[in-house]
Amino acid sequence: MTLRTVEWKNNSVIMIDQTKLPNILEYVTYTDYNQIADAIRTLVVRGAPAIGVSGAFGLALAALQSNATTKDDLISYMETAKKILFETRPTAINLAWGLEKIMEIAKKSDTVENLKNDVVQYAKKMAEDDIQINMTMGKNGSELFNDNDTIMTHCNAGALATVGYGTALGVIRATKDSGKNIKVIATETRPIQQGSRLTAFELKHDGIDVSLIPDTAVGYSMANGLVDKIVVGADRILRTGHVYNKIGTYQVATMANQHKIPFYVAAPLSTFDMKSNPEDVVIEQRKGSEVTGIGDKKTAPDGIDVINPAFDMTPPELIAGIITEKGVVNTPFEESIKKLFQAN
Ligand code: MRU
């Protein structure tokens, strides 16, 4: 069984507290949407699909929390909650997607009671769908990988970044389940080490062969023939095929291009942003202390200036294919992505 990151149970939301991993596997329970907003902000839950569903759960909690007696008042309470949840993290489009879906359902409901029930049922369905979508995506992607491949991944796009199973790690799981023998190289992913804390933890938990490297060994690993293919997740993909993902992804993709190693991205359709242009995408800038220390240990001089972007953009020309639940798309991406959505 892979880990279940977020779940709705008895009108509350249960999550793995990812800030405690890999040392402690602890679950937290929330009944207030403000707690969900805090959990997203402080990375108790992180990863684009996981925060999409968490946002939806948060908005469902808000509906239950409200004392409104009319539908209009309840919608207006939910709009306030939506804004608070939306403002937690700016880059992953899945958060806006999850919140919008719940508001759509709420607006279609006729009475206060039905609305509360409808949004809870819909949010629960989104969570179940997430796992199924990841499994389908995994199957689609597994065909791109061969027996005895060593696959590099960056950050954590696994069960812990989704409701379960994972996007990039879902592809890796499905490849293994198809009977192919594979190995994984996980980058540490400084500054907050989603690779070592989360990817290494979850692959080890599931018995998948994984070696950890510092981010600085990406070039070495490729130059020395240790990597056959790369697969990463995404926080947002534009209609042009520009991929926003964890800081350092662009470096991995550039290095892969230099060594002619195929670089794949795995993401559900809910990660595509068909409206924005690159200049519209806000890259989250995080606090300097993530860079000036590791955990509680200080590793830089006091008062040093820090630049700490959480995401970067990989241009389409560096990408061999984007794996989705509807199939794998290739260059020219603008055309193939358009077709993907037309077929939907
Ligand atoms: O800052 P994080 O940990 O939320 O960043 C996560 C990533 O960048 C993942 O690669 C991305 O969300 C894809 S998750 C399936």
Image (cartoon, helix red, strand yellow):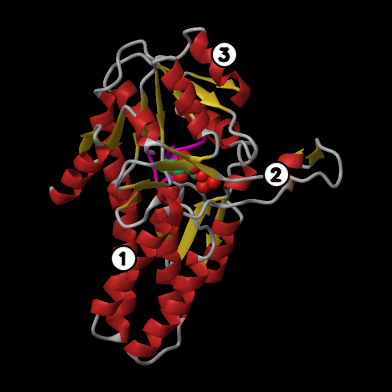
Q: Is residue 55 visible?
A: yes
Which amino acid lies under the numbered mark 3 shown in the image of this protein?
A: Tyr
Residue placed farthest to the front in the image? 279
Q: Earlier in the sequence, mark 2 or mark 3?
A: 3
The residue wearing badge 1 is 101
Spatial distance from mark 3 to mark 1, Cα to Cα? Answer: 44 Å
Task: Examine the structure image and report whether residue 333 is included in the region drawn in magenta.
Answer: no
Q: Mark 3 = which residue?
A: 220
Foreground label between 1 and 2: 2
Q: Residue 11 occupies which quadrant of the picture?
A: bottom left
Q: Horizontal placement of 139 versus 203: left or right? A: left
Residue type at mark 1?
Answer: Lys
Mark 1: give few (<14), some (14-19) or many (20+) Cα within 10 Å: some
Question: What percent of the width, then of the height, locates residue 143?
Answer: 24, 23
The residue range painted magenta reads 155-165
Whether residue 344 can be seen here: no
Few, some or many residues within 10 Å of mark 3 (<14, 14–19, 20+): few
The image shows residue 239 at horizontal and vertical percentages of 29, 47
The reply, left or right, for residue 239 in relation to residue 41 is: left
Q: Main secondary structure of the magenta part?
A: loop
